[in-house]
Amino acid sequence: MAHPTPFNLLVKHAGLSLTEASLYLATPLDTVKSWSTGRSPAPAGALEHLGTLITRQILAAQDILVTQAGADKIMIECPASFDEAVAMGWPCHGAFVAMAARVIAAAPVTTGFIDYQPAC
């Protein structure tokens, strides 16, 4: 079995599919697949961009945990579609899910979801 590539690990950790990574990085899907399998090395900029997304997910999760500290249940506003995830500032629904998973993993109480309510 081949070892995972740094690029592939970051893509998975960010919650992105290869298609979503391609869109997020504005890079052809075939190139992203090549980076993922290790056929060619991913450029440092692509790795940094994914790292920035992961850091943003961590910070967003921490913000939810801090702003709802002391609550009996932590509620996470959840997009129902790709478009809603983008409206919330995420590159795709998978990136939101990865952030929400961080909240759930760290929450000292149960968690739940509420529908995304766009600002007027």
Image (cartoon, helix red, strand yellow):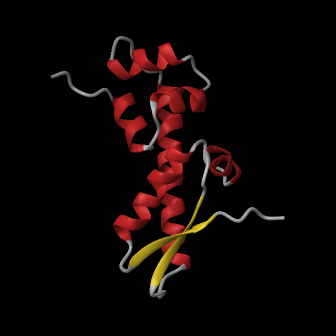
- Residue extending furthest toward the right: 120
Q: Who is closer to the viewer here, 120 or 62?
A: 120
- Residue under the point 34% across and 30% down: 6
Is residue 29 positioned above or below 60 on the image? above
- Toward which corner of the image does residue 23 lie, by quadrant? top right
Q: Please state the horizontal and vertical placement of residue 102, each as a whole percent of the image.
A: 41, 60
Q: Please state the horizontal and vertical placement of residue 7, each as a whole percent of the image.
A: 39, 29
- Residue under the point 39% across and 66% down: 104
- Toward which corner of the image does residue 103 lie, by quadrant? bottom left
Q: In which quadrant of the rendered image does the C terminus lie?
A: bottom right
Q: How many marks?
A: 0
Q: Please state the horizontal and vertical placement of residue 105, each as a whole percent of the image.
A: 34, 65
- Residue under the point 62% across and 50% down: 85
Q: In which quadrant of the rendered image does the N terminus lie?
A: top left
Q: Please state the horizontal and vertical placement of residue 97, each as a whole percent of the image.
A: 48, 53
- Residue extending furthest toward the left: 1
- Residue under the point 71% across and 51% down: 87
